[in-house]
Image: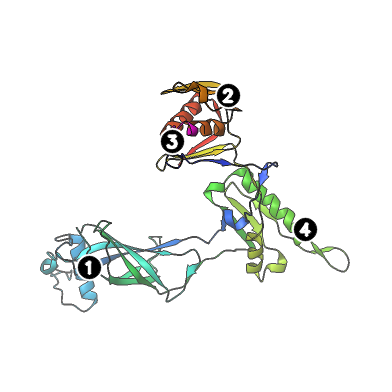
Amino acid sequence: MFIRNLIAVIALTCVTAPLYAGGMKLGDICRLKGQEDNTLQGLGLVVGLRGTGDGDSAPTTRALGRMMQLMGGQVAQDSLGRLDIKDIENAKNVALVFVTAKIPSVGAQQGDQLDVTINAINAKSLDGGYLMLTPMLGPRADNDTVYALAQGPINTTPAGPPTNGRIQKGCKMESTIKAEFHLNGKITLILHRDFATFDTAQRIEDEINNLAALTFGEVGNDSGTPSQKRTEAHAIDQLHIEVMIPELYLNDPIKFISFLLNTPIQLSSHSTRVVINERDGVVVIGEDVEIAPVLVTHRNLRIEAGGRTIESMASLGNSPLIENAKLKALADALNALDVPTDDLIAIIKTLQRKGDLYGEVIFE
């Protein structure tokens, strides 16, 4: 019964201090600028379909004629030297498709093989098709550099639409794409969205600068004057923190970055936050979320929040008690009374609209 009616109310337990670390490192909440996924894209032709291709689509017919011409095929031309595509305009086993491949955040080396995603433009199904050799360009349309070539038999899944498919390791890198992570002697940390606040960015700046003063410091020469500049961090906004690489590590930035990302970090507590996922029926309530003294009547329940009691019209004598005006205490009592998750979420929404919930409510 308890498991069935568990409404996933999770309290974020606070320690006595207003901060918590929990073994979290700087690398757990941010990444380096330049260390992100990139997309290669191309426009290709799929052949070998079972009559489910584009049919009399003019763009597909022109692309097929052009490919045949480049491969030495005999394609008729009109009096102006243009391709005469009348002979191939009813090719129903051919489809024009979009081809994409993801380059991982660490980059890709020449010869690496990546998975390919195929999406039909007009075809009814790509089942049984074969992607002809397709040049893969970068995400910018004004750059015609070919970074990779894609080809191979297309796999469709019964669970997915037949107009989408994949080719495992169907894209071969022709160029090396490096993931640059430092520029002009500095790196840029980018906070993950869940941690991106001005407070967190400022805390990271302070932590790095304090750590730098203790760990790297300023190295003096024999005369006692500083000769080596220490590292310095500067928060640009709630997402970005620029960090200067110490001169000692300019020729070995990897060692410095490894040390930096493994640095323990303390963040401000989110104990006044409520996160609600209505689709999955999950409610996460911070320990310090308070509510005003209110009286809520819900179905067969009479709930006095912020007072001392919760009364059930069905069993007045065995009702649990609320010891304080905390939302967590109210949620625990509702769970004990078998109140479903949807009803708890409805009560929280009402308290928020009325202005009687003192905390941040986030809907996912």
| Amino acid type, label 2 | Gly
Q: Earlier in the sequence, mark 2 or mark 1?
A: 1
| Amino acid type, label 3 | Thr
Mark 3 vs mark 4, CA separation in Å: 50 Å
Mark 3 vs mark 2, CA separation in Å: 21 Å
Q: What span is colored magenta in the figure?
A: 335-341
- Where is mark 1, residue-wise? 129
Mark 2 vs mark 4, CA separation in Å: 48 Å
Residue 269 picture quarter: top right
Of tags 3 and 1, which is closer to the observer? Answer: 3
- Where is mark 2, residue-wise? 306
Total residue callouts: 4
- Where is mark 4, residue-wise? 214
- Where is mark 3, residue-wise? 341
Residue 146 visible in this rendered orientation of the protein: no
What secondary structure is found at the residue carrying circle 3? helix
CB-based contact (under 8 Å), mark 2 and mark 4: no
Q: Earlier in the sequence, mark 2 or mark 4?
A: 4
Q: Residue at x 38, y 60 (%)?
A: 141
Left or right of residue 150: residue 326: right
- Residue 49 vs 300, above or below: the answer is below
Instruction: Estimate the x, y position of residue 311 in percent, counting from the top left.
Output: 50, 22
- Residue 56 vs 309, above or below: the answer is below
